[in-house]
Amino acid sequence: MLASLSVVLLLAGAAFFLGGSVGMLRFPDVYTRLHALTKADNLGLGLVVLGLMLQAESLAAVGKLFVIWLLLLAASATASQLVASWAQENGFAPWRG
Amino acid sequence: MSSVLVLALTGAGLILLGLHALIVKVHLLRKILALNIISSGIFLLLAGLAARTPGGEPDPVPQAMVLTGIVVAVAATALALALLLALRSATGRTRLDDDNGQ
Amino acid sequence: MAWLTGLPLAVDLVLGTTLLWLAWRALSSPDLFQAVALFIAFGVILGLVWARLDTIDIALAEIALGAGVTGALLLAALSQLQPAEVDARAAPSATGANEHQAGQPGQTAETADADEAQHKPAVFRALLAAVMGLLLLAALFGLGLVTWQLWEPSSGLTQQVNTHLPESGVEHPVTAVLLNFRGYDTLLEIAVLLLALIGVWSLATASNLGDTTPEPVLAALSRLLAPLMILVAAYLVWVGAHAPGGAFQAGSVLGAAGVLLRLSGWRLPAGAAGWPLRLVLALGVAVFAFIGIAVIGLGEPLLGYPTAWAKHAILVIELAATLSIGAILASLFIGGRP
């Protein structure tokens, strides 16, 4: 039961990664690409981490996995903020479809 | 075993790719990249040798050699890049072809 | 679930193909910035390959060094090589501007890398191609021989290492090899790191040292990450005695922390850039060599710690080496004598 739930979560996480990657390749400008990448990857990694937590051998491993997710959230938020503000300062206009 | 063979063959392929680029490409930064890819290929081959153990636990000696090698490769890359920047500020050149320079 | 048995091999095939493709693109794409970005991706995938091969020690070092620090070094050098090109990227319309300037001498020729000597006489190029072909064939033959031998199982030195592991002072075989059985390699390796730094220092002097404060977002992130990375480094040194980890991995994390601080805009305080920095840089080699030589006084060979003290000797050496490796890697990134 727990194992199949874990597999479902992992697959859902992989689907989010796939969606984020497609978005990064297909979206029209820097800002929307950043959106696709960070939103989908943060959620995707969250699901993967959740799935792995269900299989973890100890509570310590669960804690480490959770910290990994938090660190990635902080890093990707900072990185996307930096890229977006650099793009804005250097005159990349947002896409208006 | 077959997984290890796949990755060791990848290592061999990387060495060939890197060697080719090291000879053919003229930009020095590209040559530095090529050297790094050659060393990655060598590390993969060494890890393949380490994985031959029947028990499943990889041989620690090649592992230690690869670990040492990665650190040395980073140091060598840093020195090579510093040399490249020094060459550029001395001669204005970053490529090794004959008639690009003055 | 019989179809699942082929899955690991499929994963390895995908990883191997991706590695080869990334390497090929990094070596052939016309834009150097793109080449460096692809090379960083190559390092990350290689880290996954190390995890697949069950060599966690190497995976840790590869991610921190091969992908992290090397990537940062390459990008820093690239931005110094091509200020014109970095500016050109700021204008959205300038994409592809470097392609049609390929091969021209001067500033623009550096941005595009239209390699291969196309202006040589045909005979010369044919001869060159023939020599290259022969060389690559010979390399292929030798590498084929090596991989052929991978079919034959061999325990290598695993037996010897496991037999002597109780005398080494640690329980993790890779750490035992690095710090005890092959201590020579490790001592000389830290010396090589130091030599590389001396080489870099003799070529350039570091610019803009002194106290500054970075912009708020980066300051916040680095205030969060830097202490955490120091904690991770300390954990890695400690855990290296019985599990993957140790001085190199910990030093790599420390070095990466230094690179991160530098990139976010922090500068080495002027007071720390003099002898305190040099002391930390030399500490690893000094402590390692001192202990290695001191054991001769106890009737042991060079670098042969007595079993009773081995654990403590290794811990002291590892702590010193971690600090030095971290400081050397960060100084290599700063890239000049402060």
Image (spheres, coloured by chain):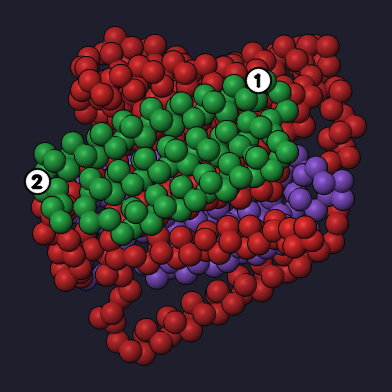
Chain colours: A green, B purple, C red
Residue C281 in the image, given as x and y percentages of width and height: 46, 21
Q: What residue is shown at x 63% (from left), y 63% (from top)?
A: C13
Q: CA distance from mark 2 to mark 1?
A: 47 Å
Location of residue C4 (image quadrant): bottom right
Mark 1: amino acid? Ala
Q: What residue is shown at x 50% (from left), y 35% (from top)?
A: A46
Residue sitting nearer the eye, C170 or C68: C68
Mark 2: amino acid? Gly
Q: Residues within 10 Å of mark 2 (few under 14, many from 20)?
A: few
Q: Secondary structure at mark 2?
A: loop
Q: Secondary structure at mark 1?
A: helix
Q: Report whether residue C155 is seen.
A: no
The quarter of the image holding the C terminus of chain C is top left
Q: Earlier in the sequence, mark 2 or mark 1?
A: 1
Whether A25 is drawn above or below C328: the answer is: below
Residue B8 in the image, given as x and y percentages of width and height: 67, 60
Q: Which mark is residue A91?
A: 2
Residue sitting nearer the eye, C144 or C195: C144
Left or right: C41, with C56 as reference point: left
State the residue position of label 1. Answer: A60
Left or right: C321, with B3 as reference point: left
Residue A24 in the image, given as x and y percentages of width and height: 33, 53
